[in-house]
Image: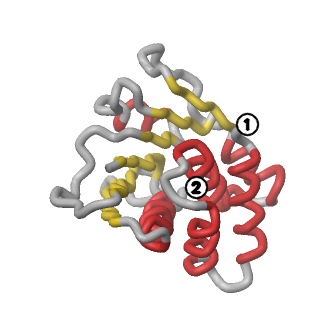
């Protein structure tokens, strides 16, 4: 069983990203549970989407100690990183996250939002870039299932750009 927390601010599309990640896991024949929370501000306030992926039944649907944390903002990192497992993986959007505590051993700093703006013309693709990063690092879902889940969820007419975003995320991790 693996626990994921995708965090940032409202409006960055992390709730959708969590739903897509869970659907990709189900597409791979795994069990998945997705939950979400965000501040009363909705846009601009802290938000998180949590996903549990398992090969067997999931009996408790809440993430307690994530194996993986995506922090798209400094505030999200500060607020949601306290219970990341000691050997957990941390991915930060270096566009907005400038200070990463030294206690984290496995850190990937990627300018996710900057890549979205520069390569795809809009920062709204940052969540899909992040999903590509999650999949490449963790191998929790197959890239084929993730692409299928992305294309099933994104607005009509944006499929090609979102596919490019996914590929950009995958390519950003060496």
Residue 18 pos. (x, y %): 44, 61
| Dot placed on the residue nearer the N-terminal end, 1 or 2 | 2
Protein image colouring: secondary structure
For the residue pair 44 and 18, the one nearer the viewer reads as 18
Residue 172 pos. (x, y %): 73, 43
Please report the residue visible at 77 percent of the width from the left and 74 percent of the height from the top. Answer: 160
Residue beneath disc 2: 131
Give the quadrant of residue 66: top left
Which is in the foreground here, disc 1 or disc 2?
1
Q: Distance from label 1 to label 2 (Cα)?
A: 15 Å
User: Which quadrant, please, contains the C terminus?
Assistant: top right
Q: Secondary structure at mark 1?
A: loop
Residue 159 pos. (x, y %): 71, 77
CB-based contact (under 8 Å), mark 1 and mark 2: no
Residue beneath disc 1: 174
Q: Is residue 165 above or below residue 115?
A: below
Q: Is residue 109 above or below residue 16?
A: above
Please report the residue visible at 35 percent of the width from the left and 37 percent of the height from the top. Answer: 80
Is residue 11 among what the camera can see? no
Residue 100 pos. (x, y %): 51, 22
Q: Residue furthest left?
A: 59
């Amino acid at each position: 069983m693996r626990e994921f927390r995708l965090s940032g601010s409202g409006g960055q599309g992390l709730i959708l990203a969590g739903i897509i990640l869970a659907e990709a896991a189900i597409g791979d024949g795994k069990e998945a549970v997705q939950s979400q929370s965000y501040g009363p501000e909705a846009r601009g306030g802290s938000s998180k989407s949590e996903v549990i992926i398992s090969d067997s039944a999931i009996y408790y649907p809440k993430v307690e100690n994530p194996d993986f944390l995506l922090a798209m903002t400094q505030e999200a990192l500060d607020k949601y990183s306290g219970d990341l497992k000691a050997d957990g993986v941390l991915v930060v959007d270096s566009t907005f996250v400038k200070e990463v505590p030294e206690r984290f051993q496995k850190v990937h700093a990627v300018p996710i939002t900057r890549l979205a703006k520069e390569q795809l013309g809009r920062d709204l693709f940052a969540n899909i870039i992040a999903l590509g990063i999650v999949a490449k690092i963790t191998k929790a879902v197959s890239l084929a299932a993730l692409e299928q889940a992305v294309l099933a969820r994104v607005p009509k007419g944006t499929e090609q750009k979102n596919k490019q975003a996914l590929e950009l995320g995958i390519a950003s991790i060496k």
